[in-house]
Amino acid sequence: MTDDNNQKLYNLSRRRVLAGLGAVGLASAGAGLGTSAFFSDQEDFENNQLQAGTLDVLVDWEEHYYDGSAGRDLVELVPESEIDILDDSQYILPAVDNPDARAVAIRFLGDGTFQENKDAFWDATSIEALPDADGDGIQDEFDDSQVCTGEAGLTNVGNDDAQQREEGLYAPNRTSNDVTAPGDPLINLDDVKPGDFGEVTFSFHLCDNPGYVWLNGMLNEEFTGEGILTEPERNDPDEIDGVVELLDEMQVRMWYDPDCDNQVERRGEVDIMLAIDTSGSITGQEQTDLENGIAAFVDALPTDGSAQVGAVSFGGGSVTGISGLVDPGSFSLGSLSYGGNTPLPAGLDIADQVLDADGRADALPVVVVISDGGPNYDGDTSTEYSASVGGSPYTAPRSDPGFSADDNTAGYDSGTTNSAVDAAEQDETAAVADLIKAGPDGSRIAVLNIGNDPNADLGDGTDLSVYLEDEIASAGFYNETPVSNFADVADDIAAEVVVQEEVFFNGSLRTALSALSGNEGRGVPLDGDRVTTFDELADPEDDPNRDPFTGAGVTHCVGFQWWLPVNHANQIQGDKAGFDIGFYAEQSRHNTGIGMVPENETATPTPE
């Protein structure tokens, strides 16, 4: 008997476009699912016209693959003993779900900058794209205005519609060379070995209405299995009979790629302002641990000129400037003064003002909050906070609307004279954080909770960790560790802070396919505005922080990267894995993002 849900998912073509069958370990025929308009008819009346709106999804892509051949003269494999995730000469692919394996790490060779050398390697390993009229494997450039007119040469991809097959994986402007033949799936590899890696960046465009979009997929059982059980595979202690270990060993990363360059921007220019809690709750050895952790964090930042760092402290009823934006090697923490309350909104405000005033135009602005508690500050509405940072004076709250509860007063309005944190202070501080994060030019806020009790009750039933993660931090940029352990994890925190683009999944291929087939087949709900605090894997599809994507052909890119970590790997010999990956879209007008169960465009009896 055929599973009804799987039958629906595989056959649907309405409101969905599938980017093609992926096959790792097996050459196989292409598969895909198409899309048609959510509204697609035109109603004409005499001398008047009523035209129903449309929702159609068009896709394009560029794929890269490194197997130790193409681009080999541009890189070298980094020995395990030399791996350092913040060394700008390296590119790291960690063994996320496979801690016993060694990460894939390469060092870029050449006389250019890190990014120039990396770009050259990416060009050398580009194997196919659409549109690609000249067949060089690198995607042709086009403008958003050309997408919905057909001038860009983008496509629908389908497996149950002959016309869509011709337009999609068989499209004449898809790369055709000794790697890719018409109709091939995008990921189509038959000899994957440990150390290999690759990626596809998918670009999708909604014509013409805005809509909610999901990234989805599923395991294709027809192209998945253990294959021939070789003697080394059979004798490997990690071999489990009947289990396709390739699904567990293969690692996957998915991310929003706003510049559509097929790369996770782990580096690049970044300007960082530390906002350091120096309130009276941090005492004795904790003060030393805090300062050692900050020193280790700064030492872990890139020193090639791509990073700048500065700092302010907040505590004792004031904000104190420590350093303006400088090269990490020139940063000095100096002597911190501890005591008093926790004026977090003022610390956030002044740190962000420094980024606005002195940050570089092309650098990612980041405020890193290091605190063991929630906001607690003086409620005198006439009191402002002043600090000199890098020789320039700053005052909080700034005069812009919304940086305090009442714009008609000079100071903060929700503070109290007692030592307890209350809901009004939390709300006022969250409003400040939201303004700092808002918009395309907003700053990222990364939070490190160093409280010995990270889940402490703030006094009104609010959990500290929940408040700092949901109300203060940018999505995906919350961490917690006891202050005594700060120095030991500082390099990991620094590595996360300098990531330029939002990675929403890291894990095995098996776990990825589980996520991509969730939500009744709709998959992972994507967010049209990454500034909001929406968790693609944990939050509900209709979360108010999830936004639809712009229509009118605007380009939106999502990266899908895979790699096979380096270990003996005999347990995967002969394994093959097939999977589908694609996009599902629904118009946002009259919808909340909750999604519909994918359905067939035309009713087809389900075979028993």
Image (tube, grey):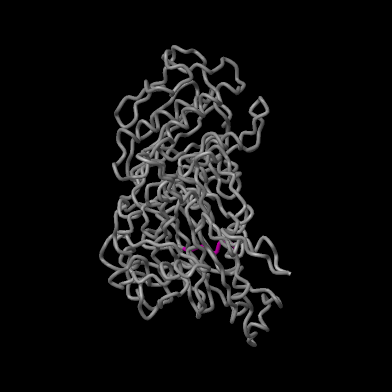
Residue, x 34% and y 55% (percent of image)?
147
Is 547 on the left or on the right of 260, as rendered?
Answer: right
Task: Tell me if residue 488 is in the magenta stretch.
Answer: no
Question: Is any part of residue 37 visible from this angle?
Answer: yes
Task: Tell me if residue 95 is in the magenta stretch.
Answer: yes
Could you tell me which quadrant the C terminus lies in?
A: bottom right
Residue 513 spot, x, y in % from top left: 59, 62
Name, please, the residue furthest toward the front.
46
Q: State whether residue 25 is above or below residue 357.
A: below
Name, please, the residue furthest toward the left.
111
Residue 321 spot, x, y in % from top left: 38, 29
Residue 72 spot, x, y in % from top left: 36, 75
Could you tell me which quadrant the N terminus lies in?
A: bottom right
Q: State whether residue 64 is above or below residue 588.
A: below
Question: Which portion, as a residue range, is magenta?
Answer: 93-97
Give the total of numbered labels: 0
Question: Is any part of residue 99 visible from this angle?
Answer: no
Residue, x 41% and y 32% (percent of image)?
312
Is 290 on the left or on the right of 599, as rendered?
Answer: left
In this view of the protein, which residue sits in the foreground, 223 or 370?
223
